[in-house]
Image (cartoon, rainbow, N blue to C red):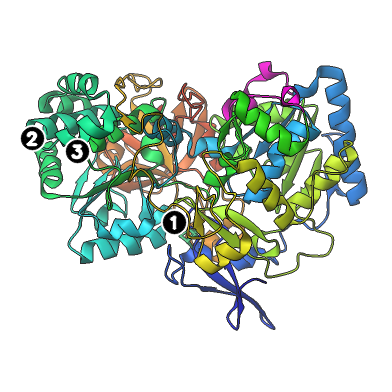
Amino acid sequence: ALTADPQGVATHCPYCALQCGMWIRSTEHGVEISGRDFPTNRGQLCRKGWTAGELLDSAERLRIPLVRDSREEALRPATWDDALDRIADAFTGLQRAYGNDAVAIFGGGGLTNETAYLLGKFARVALKTRMIDYNGRFCMSAAATAMRKAFGLDRGLPFPLDDIAGTDLLILAGVNTAETMPVLVRHLDELRASGGRIVVIDPRRTPTAALADVVVQPVPGTDVALAYGLLFGAIRAGLTDGEFIAERTVGFADVRATAMGYWPERVELLTGVSVAQLDELIHELALARTTILLTGRGVEQQVHGSAAVLAYINLMLALGRIGRPYCGYGSVTGQGNGQGGREHGQKADQLPGYRRIDDPEARAHVAQVWGIAPGDLPGPGVDAVTLLTDPDTDVHGMLVIGSNPVVSAPNAQLAEKRLRSLDFLAVVDIVLSETAELADVVLPTTQWAEETGTMTNLEGRVLLRQKALDPPAGVLTDIEILHQLARRLGHASGFPTDSRQVFDELRQASRGGVADYSGIDYERIAAENGIFWPCSEPAGIGSPRLFLAGFATPDGRARFVDVAADLDADCPDAAFPFYLTTGRLMDHYQSGAQTRRIASLRRASPEPFAEVHTATARSLGISDGERVRIVTRQGSVILPARLTTTIREDTIFVPFHWGGSGRANTVTTNAVDSTCGMPAFKLTAARVEAV
Ligand code: SF4
């Protein structure tokens, strides 16, 4: 280990994008986990982090490959050779019959940078398919698209997390960090202790709202109108920064003209946020000299999610509160490596180094690193929802790795039907997830503590997860599995099994790109508590604060983007009068494949529910705990009602961590933001019926 200590091996939590530092140690009583002093967590862990070790020796983890000859049979144990041969033979046969794009890869935002990189190379070099995408599409794509348009590049936070504690005003829009990233609350507490103020914008009064000075609960899907309303108020109150706008931005005139159409009374009508509350928000902006605005999935997972992010960025640019210390816009990313996952090649339109796959120079560079001709590099492919639900893609076989789309995909019954219709499905996972249950071949893989690799957290900080334990006998790492498959597909070299070798190649492939990792190595990461990308120099800690000297656009100026406040695709009507929104709970992580298998987390949150306002329940004749049917245009799900007064009366909330009969995504729309493929999980028209 690079950093070992009596407390154990220095590593990081397997879950969210905070990537809290941990010590992990083997004792005669089993694996011990403790918090480690790291900039994101200062030794703290949440309940998920503390219990992460329980899955390592769980009876439910996979330890041997599983195969079956037909879908009517049950999965049965097999040798690695048998399982790997089946995948290689099936993919080769399907590609011979239908062409290279007949085989697809669906990856995950929790995979290490090394696996993400090698997976992109495996798809494009070994399989020669353009069909690769990943579940980070459900998590980061709207904010990424918006930041790229406004700033020329996106990084979850273009500043270190520690800046939060030093700002005057923190605005959290659609962010429920108290449940999704509990350790981040430490930064909010520090902010409050230093006199800073917090505004929360969310249709639900979440546990995060309890930390706020001002809370507004807009109608779901009205963020663009709300942001324009705030810009109107800021212009009227003389809060805009003329010098910043003139010197560091382009395009304010059009945005200003649009904002003039969002006077307070109209915004109240559109958003449900009263004129008095709008005044209160403007007052907060006027009091603050520095401001950080963060969006989360609540804003981003809509058909106009990228427009909503751009509208909030417009506000921050007009105030001159971006590209300055303790100021900025950022997205609180969800998955552990949603950031690095796309930077290095799992996303359909990107190549390593955050390069565009349709850029001839980028193709030439990456092709040269991979030893192929640029013309042989396939792509771009299609977005995740298309890949998972559209039969017209002509995909006949798929490898799913580190993802559970049967639970997590929007309109999941459509995704499940599509996966069942494939001629061949292979899944690589640590447990028999709902997706793995459908597969023809299931390969067991190592868990986070059993392999060394890098992750990139929400700040763009590249960090090192060190191997602390040996995996169960016979369980391979992701990159060993890719090596074995590539070898069977005729690529004996080019797919190393050592993570350091893979990272060294990733560094070369990223050199000169937007997300340049070429100056980063394992030793420096361990010595510096992580290195921020871009980093092409073999010294220093990389680039913690972006945009101080200019934005990443050709002229160094940020772009105002004049977005429209279109109505959502799936608006409530007489038949479906409620806004259904989904989200996460403190005790579970994403599709729940891991956390539902940890006893204390399962006990704390054993089942899904539908959160309904008490007044709404009364009008529908529903009592607390009674089972209700949530019906949408996609289908229906029956759940116990949980009555509350903290949600809007027109909104229903369902957590999405469960499969089977409690699967929230059975009813969510598969409409996407057309600019980025982000599914609209946060707004599906629904009705509620007593069962
Ligand atoms: Fe893990 Fe996130 Fe909890 Fe930290 S906040 S311990 S990274 S789940």
Quickly name the residue at label 1: 586
Tell me which residue sits at (74%, 42%) in the image.
427
How far from the left and from the top, in percent, is residue 618?
Answer: 27, 39
How far from the left and from the top, in percent, is residue 270?
Answer: 21, 25
Quote the CA–CA distance across marks 3 and 2: 10 Å
Give the SS element for disc 1: loop
Residue 515 sits inside the magenta stretch: no
Q: Give the amino acid at mark 2.
A: Gly
Quickly name the residue at label 2: 238
Magenta segment = 373-395
Q: Give the amino acid at mark 3.
A: Leu
Give the SS element for disc 3: loop
Mark 2 surroundings within 10 Å by alpha-carbon count, few (fewer than 14), some (14 through 19), many (20 or more): few
How far from the left and from the top, in percent, is residue 9?
Answer: 62, 73
How far from the left and from the top, in percent, is residue 656?
Answer: 50, 43
Q: Please tell me which residue lies in front, 583 or 659.
A: 583
Q: Please tell me which residue lies in front, 7 or 659.
A: 7
Quickly name the residue at label 3: 319
Relative placement, left or right, of 433 versus 94 is left
Q: Nearer the viewer, mark 3 or mark 1?
A: 3
